[in-house]
Amino acid sequence: MKRLVFPGKNFPVYVFDTYEEASLAAAEVVVSEMKKKPEFLLGLATGSTPVRLYRALIEKCRAGEISFSRVKTYNLDEYYPIDPKNEQSFLAFMKANLFDHVDLPKENIHIPNGAATDPAAEAVRYEEELLAIGGVDLQVLGIGSDGHIGFNEPADEFILPTHLVTLTEQTINDNSRFFRAKSDVPTHALTMGVGAIMRAKKCILIANGKNKAEAIRGAILGDPTPKNQASALQFHRDVAFYLDKDAASEIL
Ligand code: GLP
């Protein structure tokens, strides 16, 4: 593992040989933070990146090292519109990859409702939940190949509250691998804005693979810009990046 710090950038970047090592190191952070506080508020991400981290959390929970019994989870985003029972929904993804395997009470799960009839009202409802907690204790993040965090796509501005977003062609292409056909990928999503992510007391961003290298370069070394929404993290009070060497290839 290599720890990189860049001049003028006030956060650590950890580079590992493999995705597995990066995930396990990130899992250690989640575990040690969870142990400090049983009523932990945990912000969660979907996508293939955090899957190994979630498996590590399941193992730690089964071993009795951590418990989710008093934890509350807040997911970054959900497709819109989508039936939460659809196996491609982010709720279904979270159940399959974490929720169904740990002692997390169902009522402690928070995620935007992809089946809400009024998406604007649903965005307001979710933001009110997020404002009420004041910020999660730890936010787990992945990154899109276009620099998105949650589903905050490249834009002319940073949108702070939860909102309905139109997914970019690039994101639809990237995520089509989870669907039968590209035309099945929802065109919209409800996503936490950059505001709730910035309110998190701590953020860890995991990235692996060459297809993330350019987005990671922009996020870490570029001037902060809404064209790469992850670059907002440069202003976060406590953020760390966990990368495999491919994702780090443009910053080494
Ligand atoms: C997803 C999510 C993001 C995630 C990103 C990368 O669809 N909305 O939270 O970080 O796109 O996904 P993956 O980890 O599959 O590359």
Image (cartoon, grey):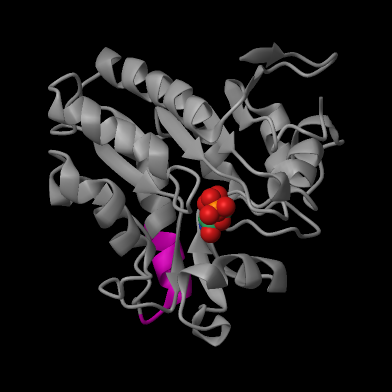
Please give left or right for residue 168 compared with residue 78 in the image: right
Q: Is residue 164 visible?
A: yes
Please identify the quadrant where the N terminus is shown: top right
Vertical order, 252 against 162 (above or below): above
Name the dominant secondary structure of the magenta segment. helix
Please give left or right for residue 162 compared with residue 68 in the image: right
Q: Is residue 133 visible?
A: no
Q: Which quarter of the picture shows residue 187?
A: bottom right
Please give left or right for residue 72 compared with residue 67 in the image: right
Give the residue drawn at x 46%, y 21%: 25
In this picture, which residue range is highlighted in magenta?
117-125
Vertical order, 88 against 152 (above or below): below
Residue 85, percent from left and from top? 25, 73
- Where's ligand 1: which quadrant? bottom right
Residue 4, percent from left and from top? 73, 15
Vertical order, 23 against 238 (above or below): below
Residue 205, percent from left and from top? 57, 34
Between 24 and 152, the one lying in front of the other is 24
Give the residue drawn at x 12%, y 38%: 103
Please give left or right for residue 48 compared with residue 36 in the image: right
Q: Residue furthest front?
A: 17
